[in-house]
Image (spheres, rainbow, N blue to C red):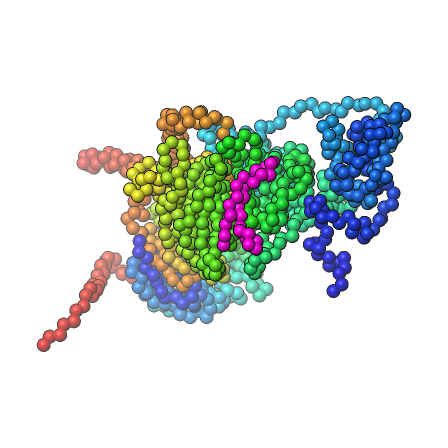
Amino acid sequence: MRPILLKGHERALTQIRYNREGDLIFSVSKDQQICVWFSHNGERLGTYRGHQGAIWTVDVDPTTTMIASGSADNTIRLWDVKTGRLLKTWDFPTAIKRVEFNEDGTKLVAVTEKRMGHLGTIVVLNINPDVNAEQSDEKALVIVCEESKATVAGWSYLSKYIIAGHEDGSISQYDAKTGDLLLNIPIHELNNPITDLQWSADRTYFITASKDKTAKLITAKDLEVLKTYTADTPLNSATITAKKDFVILGGGQAAMEVTTTAVRQGKFEARFYHKIFEDEIGRVRGHFGPLNTVAADPTGKGYASGGEDGYVRVHHFDKGYFDFMYEVERERANKLAQQAAQAQAAAAPATAKA
Amino acid sequence: MAPSFDHLREEDLDEEDIDMDEVDISDLREKYEVQLEQGYDTFVVIDGLPAVSEEQKPKLIKFLLKKLNTVGKTREDMIYMPMGDDGMSLRFAFVEYSSPAEASAAVRQLDYVPLDKKHTLRVNKLTDIDRYGREGRISEEFVPPKIEPFQEKEHLRWFMADPADRGRDQFVMYRGDTVGVFWNNEKDQPENIVDRQHWTETFVQWSPLGTYLTSVHAQGVQLWGGASWSRLRRFPHPFVNLVAFSPGEKYLVTWSNRPIQIPDSGHPVLTLDDDGKNYIIWDIETARPLRSFAQQDIHPEEHGPKKGPPKFPWPVFKWSADDKYVARLNQGTSISIYELPKMNLLDKQAVKIEGVMDFEWAPATVQREGVKTYEQLFCFWTPEIGNNPARVGLMSIPSKQIVRTLNLFSVSDVKMHWQSEGTYLCVKVDRHSKSKKSQATTLEIFRVKEKGVPVEVVDTIKDTVINFAWEPKGDRFVIITTPEPVGATAVPPKTSVSFFCPELKKGNQVGSFKHLRTLEKKNHNAIYWSPKGRFVVIATVHNTQSSDLEFWDLDFDGEKPENEKDLAACLQLMGTGDHYGITDVEWDPSGRYVATWASAWKHTMENGYHLYDFKGELLREEHIEKFKQWQWRPRPPTLLTKEEQKQIRKNLREYSRIFEQEDAERISSADVAVVEARRRLLNEWYAWREAIEKEVAEERAALGLPADPAAELLKRKIAEVAPDAQEQVIEEIMEEVLEETEEIVN
């Protein structure tokens, strides 16, 4: 599994997103640039210029028509993927830490920073999926986080809930229509901020990463913790792989302490865990700074990691990865294959008759 | 600056110590001491004297005076021995000393001292007799002491019986603030026996036979044990720093670098006599202090400049193998040997050895050839003084006879290493040439058990020996040498590891020691022998660059190289390991496993432990935040006789078959359990997925949304981009230059 090294950013990566088809990678970094890359060969397709501050977050809509980005210049910007044209700028009093489209690309949720007397908020904007249409200035919904500021947020299945992770380690579930707080559960250790929240394909469950060195798999419906993955280093990011039942965690000691220790000690590795059994399966080395973000290809062919070192490493999985199976998984797969064969055998005479 | 009480240094304070016995300062004391208490404080009452007639009385007094004057100053006319009506003495006497200090010294040192075979002196202060023995304080009637009914106590050696019947060993782990004791489960998670937060404040330590677990607190030391891990003993030594047990677990030495301060309100266990002392020797059975000692000044190095801060040698009090004697070095002058349990100085004086630098007890009671009497041995060395050569000596206790001495020249340093059974003593002598420029090391090996204690010299070593270790219960040893003098260099110099063993000889004789093999250009700096001998781990510890381990077998069952045919060893490397940041290595008491760990006390990089088997196969590794300490629980010596052990070794094959079968069964059942658990997890997961998928689909249908929102969107988009809905195939032709050659064509 030889990685492709994407050297387009000059500063630490903050977020990486694949589009739905898995052929494009969008990456943002503190160097005020958004880059888009071909995932299969690492060629840079282009950049989106305009932000005046470090960019914290990016997301692409389900049809790869538009991307939204949030930055420390206190704006959310909407871009046309194809042309790189800036479609819309929304101004806020503080920095934007996270943006995410809902499943049909009609809404955007954003998390604003708590700073300069402004409380942290979660904002919902209505998006017109038409590239040429005028976007509304109106905020559809504003949720103010009075207790502990939100660090990450996202849409559940059916755009029913907004799930947010907080600085104090708790997870909240809001009604996406009214903004009412439905649940708030202290899931991670107290005062260990939640650093990432990424969804399963159908948005019924998600994975959180936290500075408390654990990642957790949680249901969207009632915030029940399904699985816990324990690492030996603070985590910055976690993602769920498609096709195979794995999760990938990324982290490493805090960036400010990096210079004082050896690479060996920094634990700058992407860690693979089995999603269901919670066992650690393997690690991928390469970065020489902590991993700030990991993203899995939605088609299950690979993953990309972005580090404090300014590089994106894109990995395409080998055959061994796809062949790897626990005994019980193989058992189940064989059983399913057998059942399918039987069903087919049962169906075949029927069609023959017809 | 004028001396004043405020900045009086601890070291300047006069110490009450054994030296008092030798230094006569009573004249000074008489002259300068401030007499605060005038009264009966200078009087003592002596009981237990024989009844004598008026004629015999002066004789007895004269005899008594000899004893009395050893601790203070008194005269014939200061002893009053009352006579009874029948003309015989009443078997007691009043004695006046010249100062209260002497009187209390007499009480401390002369009480229970035998006068002759029949009579033992009892010495008390007159004021005490007055205080405790006053009328009314003592009941006229004898009340028999109440004897508490016998209470069954927990068996302190319960840990020898593994509940799983596998003969596993226990170990203690100290990580974070938590101390836990575990059964070793090889590859599997160790089985926790007890886990307590804040069990200790600084470190934990097993007693030498594994009976007690010691925890160290600011208030003192506590011992824990039994199956319930209850507190068994407390030794309240405030601000204790270090602890050492006697080899038989009978006594305990505690040390604090802060002198003890007895508060005015008193201390529950310690008395005013212990004030200002640093060491306390305790009786473990009763948890009472036996005697306390003050710290001796560390003598500044007389030769050469001072190197770094003074190191506190530990242990200061060294125990003989049978717990009967404990000794302390008075550097340069003598060795003080105390007899247990009374803690009196052996023959009332320290053993004077001029210039003595160090001493070491034999770790076992040695039966020398041709010696019938019971003895304990220790070795010591003295440097060159003037024209006298340096000397290494072997002394027998209690006779204090020097059994053997060896004279040496051009000596810069000497280290003494006993073999675990006391069979051999290896004296490592660092010599310098006349110009003191070059260094060389020789090993002088005393064969203690052989007649006349012959000494053999191994002098083929050119480099500095930085480490030496005997094979326990064996006759082979390993040394590590380094060519450059060990100094403050960025990269530690390369080292060589050399194995030595005796030549093969007929019968039970042990041939002379020969060099077996040397491994060059290594980084190793530590040697860890299996407690059962034969296997040895050579490690690189406390090194940031390398951290490798090598597991060697000295009795390998295979072909020997030709040139080693006549040597009593067959060397084979069995395995290697690498444990980054390793700080410590320890074999389990059975010699089956080796634990290595990186302690947070030394650094904070990848703290945790590794567990290897004796042949170097890594069984388990675990990273634990703030991992501090690992210690295997020692085992008491086996109860089996030599014959029984031999029998077991003979039938080993049979036993191992049973054990292997048991192991196989256990592993397969554990595997089954794991697979079962995984199957359950997998089924639970898919059951949940099915339920949630169904639920979401229903909800979607109820809302009138498409089943797959993205697919729907995509379809719409395709319709928008390419209305004729024809799928297009875009081909891209890539050209890649594989090779370029340039040719010049004429």
Which residue sits at x=33%, y=51%? A300
In this view, the residue farthest toward the left is B746
Outermost residue on the bottom side: it is B746
Q: For this view, does B323 lie left or right of residue B64?
A: left
Residue B664, position as x, y percentages in the image:
37, 30
In percent of the image, x 76 and y 57: which residue is there?
Answer: B5
Which quadrant, please, contains the C terminus of chain A? top left
Residue nearest the viewer, comparing B564 with B131: B564
Residue at the image point whose x is 37% and y is 54% from the top: B521
In-image side of B75 versus B669 (left or right):
right
Looking at the picture, how far across and down is residue A71, in whole percent? Answer: 46, 65
Say above or below: B544 vs B21: below
Is B653 situated above or below A46?
above
Q: Position of residue A11 (x, y in %)?
A: 42, 66
Magenta-drawn stretch contains B394: yes
Queried whether the magenta region covers residue B541, the answer comes back as no
Q: How many circles with numbers are drawn on the protein?
A: 0
Q: Nearer the viewer, residue B190 or B366?
A: B366
* In the displayed structure image, the side of residue B195 where residue B739 appears, left or right: left
Judging depth in this view, the residue of B20 and A191 nearest the camera is: B20
Residue drawn where x is 47% and y is 68% of the image: A53
Which stretch appears magenta?
B384-410
The image quarter in which residue A14 lies: bottom left
